[in-house]
Amino acid sequence: MEKLEAPAGLIARDALAVVDGGCLYYNGYPTPITGMKEGEKQLVSMGAYICIFPDKLYYNTQNPSDYGSMEAYFDYEGQLEYIMCDIEGKEYPQASFGNLAPESAVNGDFWVDTENGSLNQFDAGSSMWVTIDSVYTKLRFTTLGQLPAAFSKYDGVEIEGAAFASLNGAKIIQAVGGSETEPDYIVLAGEPLENRTESEAKLSVKRTVPDMDYVCQCHNRLWGCFYGNNGKENLNELYASALGDFKNWNQFMGLSTDSWRASVGSDGVWTGAVSFLGSPIFFKEDRIHSIGVSSVGAHQVGERVCPGVQRGSHKSLAVINEILFYKAPSQVCAYQGGFPEKISAPLGDERYHDAVACGLGGKYYISMCDAKGECNLFVYDCEKGIWMREDGLKADFFATVDDELYCISGKDMYAMLGSRGEREKHVDWQCESGLLSCSEPDKKYISRISLRAAMEQGSRLELFIEYDSAGTWERAGQVQLLKAGTAQLPLRLRRCDHFRLKLCGRGDIKLLSLTREECRG
């Protein structure tokens, strides 16, 4: 067991990454990601990066110097130059203006047709003025390298304060450059059609990431969902970042690699998100929305009305052997892409909530609270279809690394399978059988049963029996070994219609056989 200060998030990569006390720790060491606000974090892995929401931070596990905010804000006050240029930032020479073309020109001269507002270049080979369809503007600053450090080529940004209306609003940075010794600049699509210098300009450049309820990674993108008011309008939307770029959520250039967003018509808050069978899957309590990812960017949103993830149980999602398990409002479900299957009937009619789960070794570990607020850790064996209750552990986070299951509960982190820390000794356990019939054809009945078990040193085994569903367990015998070995526990039954057995033990015990003797009469 390891003591933590204020755990807020956990994810498994090659090593554990933990958010504790506002700092991200990776493989047990603190990272430069510090000062995070209080509250639970979603940690999402994308390549070598760990992305942290809702703080919108990132950390490169392979290059610790690569970290920071996904968003970027740049506010500038001072001299600002607007220069006509091409898409790469090559500046055009000063153009002539008029509603008629100049009478004399040499190859490469520029002319602005003031009548229709177009930029033209003279081609001496054809002796014609050729209209330049796309005109770009270089915005040149003096920021000592701050601007190119914050933004990259093809960033989708919001511009405010530009002297020309065509340069304001949602734009794509076509080129960016500069340094501490050279003027900084960005190139934007727009047509000022004249060079201009402002001595007291005020300009802001922003690259933003939308607020999202849940986020997952699929097909080299981050995908997210949001339901509610973002401060401007009510939204019920799905989002995707640009391909391979978790910083850009507003990159719209008409390419298959663009960012993506779509409004959803179904009502209700989002309750979870996961990547499953090559698709991002988003949940509400009463339906599943799956996104068909398209190679050309025409992603499609599908909808299936069925039990979804229970609100507050988004951490119950776990994929085991190509099956997705999760906690629905009134059941635990197994989902394979069709209609979810209920698997929690053996747990009875108790209503559980606030489920946290993880999969390891073909088993689904799920911690959830009942109506009284008491917590239970259940384990579902996916191969055998058997449920087991382990104890009353309340898990806040699960993660698996190197065949070990890690759990954070409160301020404690446990290695559940014992690879770290001190292993528990002589764990108490119990199991119950189903109804066993006593009567057989030809008036045969069971007169005696015998259990044979292999037991470790210091272990104890007790046997209880319930006759005819009376509701009372009668103690039928006990065996305890001072040294490891096998033991026999016989039991003579009284005449009854049916019975149940309960085994209670302490320590490692393996039931080798259960035999019964039949009598006639």
Image (cartoon, grey):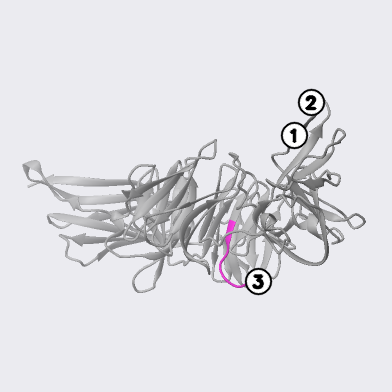
Q: Is residue 447 left or right of residue 430?
A: left
Query: Which quadrant of the structure image shows residue 70?
Result: bottom right
Q: Which residue is mark 2?
A: 126
Mark 2 residue type: Ser
Within 10 Å of disc 3 (Cα), the crowding (few <14, some 14-19, many 20+) is: some
Of label 1 and label 3, which has the lower sequence position?
3
Decide: few, some or many residues near mark 2? Use Cα within 10 Å; few <14, some 14-19, many ≥20: few
Q: State the separation of the CA atoms marked 1 and 2.
A: 10 Å
In this rendered view, identify the residue nearer to me: 320 or 183: 183
Asked if residue 108 lies left or right of residue 258, the reply is: right
- Assess whether residue 41 is covered by the magenta stretch: yes
Q: Could you say which is closer to the camera, residue 248 or residue 34?
A: 248
Q: Nearer the viewer, mark 2 or mark 3?
A: 2
What kind of secondary structure does the magenta stretch mostly adopt? loop
Pick whichever, 428 or 125, lies toward us.
125
Question: What amino acid is at disc 3?
Answer: Gly
Which residue is disc 1 drawn over? 130
The residue at the point 57 percent across, 57 percent down is 418
Real-space Cα distance between discs 2 and 3? 70 Å
Residue designated by label 3: 21
The answer to whether residue 404 is seen in the rendering is yes
- Is 30 situated above or below 44? below
Q: Position of residue 208 (x, y in %)?
A: 63, 59
Side of 332 relative to 394 (left or right): left
Magenta stretch: give its range. Answer: 37-43
Q: Quadrant of the N terminus?
A: bottom right
Mark 1 residue crowding within 10 angstroms, few (<14) / some (14–19) / many (20+) = some
Position of 217 relative to 350 (above/below): above
